[in-house]
Image: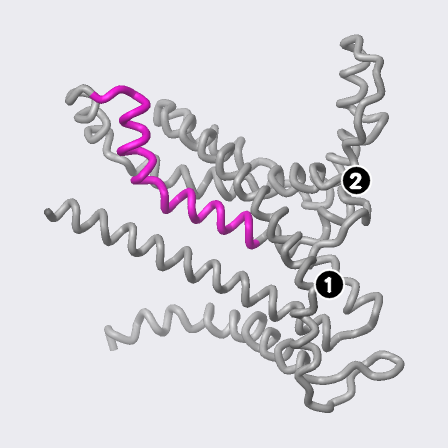
């Protein structure tokens, strides 16, 4: 009975995930192999056309564009988030909980509210333009809203706390004696960071990067609001297939392709983290 206790404890979570994640994903997967009706809806004729259409150059280009934007957002968030996490971890222990609280404070507001706030900041009569004019800049500012840059900024802002938390965990667990020993042996601050601190915290950086990338590549709210429909990401395309074009089978095929990309990245990140952790354990044993 003692050996089955963990299984009993996991059962409610497994049932919940099966009902509200696994089964819906399987239904979407099955839907991808049927046809769209003439007037919308679904015709239950088995076909691979929707799967083949996903690899059409037009839609493949949208996938690539989405991956580039998500990659840029993830890279910026990783750099900024790591710097913030490093600064928090370097603070006295008594101040760190407050700083972490401030880092995740944006999560206490609705995602739409946070995104609309950037519309207020970036529009031609927004705060940034007003400040520039108050400082004496009277030239016409380049368009900030409804651009790819605005979308990247919105994604970075909304998902930055994930990176901070992911990077803070390994930084907080680091043994201070290791860095002190490095300095005692003559290494400078940059050398210690590059050869000791950074390698030991790479799993946290990788986790934060993958989180932001996975959440960004399927996002459709931020591109719709901050991009203004000027360009399309894969999340917007899936949204349009289900709610505008009424082509549920093709929307399901796009969704499954997106899920496959996400699962592949998460699997690679898990293997890389386990391998890095195993390597550190072997080094310590040696």
* Residue 260 x/y as whole percent: 54, 67
Label 2: how many Cα within 10 Å (few below 14, some 14–19, many 20+): many
In which quadrant is the N terminus drawn?
A: bottom left
How far apart in space, not on screen, are marks 2 and 1 (Cα)?
A: 22 Å
| Label number found at residue 146 | 2
Q: Which residue is mark 1?
A: 58
Q: Of 94 and 22, which appears nearest the observer?
A: 22
Compared with 70, 48 (above or below) is below
Q: How is the image coloured?
A: one colour
Q: Is 199 part of what is drawn in magenta? A: yes
User: Which residue is at the far top?
Assistant: 136
User: Which residue is depicted at the point 48% across and 59% down?
Assistant: 265
> Which label sits in the foreground, 2 or 1?
1
The residue carrying pointer 1 sits among few (fewer than 14), some (14 to 19) or many (20 or more) residues within 10 Å by Cα, namely few
User: Is 31 one of the magenta-colored residues?
Assistant: no
| Residue 9 lies in quadrant | bottom left
Give the residues in magenta. 187-214
**Quick check: 272 left or right of 188?**
right
Look at 84% across and 66% down and name the residue there: 244
| Between discs 2 and 1, the one toward the N terminus | 1
């Amino acid at each position: 009975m003692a050996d089955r206790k963990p299984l009993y404890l996991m059962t409610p979570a497994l049932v919940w995930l099966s009902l509200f994640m696994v089964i819906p994903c399987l239904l979407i997967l099955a839907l991808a192999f049927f046809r769209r009706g003439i007037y919308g809806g679904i015709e239950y004729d088995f076909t691979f056309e929707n799967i083949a259409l996903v690899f059409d150059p037009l839609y493949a280009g949208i996938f690539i564009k989405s991956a580039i934007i998500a990659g840029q957002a993830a890279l910026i968030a990783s750099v900024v988030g790591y710097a913030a996490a490093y600064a928090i971890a370097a603070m006295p222990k008594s101040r760190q909980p407050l700083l972490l609280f401030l880092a995740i404070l944006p999560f206490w507001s609705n995602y739409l509210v946070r995104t609309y706030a950037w519309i207020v900041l970036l529009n031609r009569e927004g705060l940034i333009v007003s400040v520039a004019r108050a400082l004496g800049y009277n030239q016409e500012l380049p368009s900030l809203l409804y651009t790819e840059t605005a979308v990247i900024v919105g994604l970075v802002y909304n998902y930055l706390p994930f990176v901070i938390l992911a990077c803070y965990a390994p930084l907080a667990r680091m043994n201070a004696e290791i860095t002190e020993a490095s300095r005692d042996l003559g290494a400078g601050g940059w050398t210690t960071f590059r050869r000791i601190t950074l390698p030991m915290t790479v799993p946290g950086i990788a986790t934060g990067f993958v989180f932001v990338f996975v959440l960004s590549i399927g996002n459709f709210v931020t591109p719709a609001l901050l991009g203004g429909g000027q360009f399309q990401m894969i999340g917007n395309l899936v949204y349009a297939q289900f709610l505008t074009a009424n082509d549920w089978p093709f929307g399901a095929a796009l969704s499954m392709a997106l899920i496959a990309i996400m699962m592949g990245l998460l699997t690679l990140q898990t293997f890389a983290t386990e391998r890095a952790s195993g390597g550190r354990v072997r080094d310590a044993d040696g």
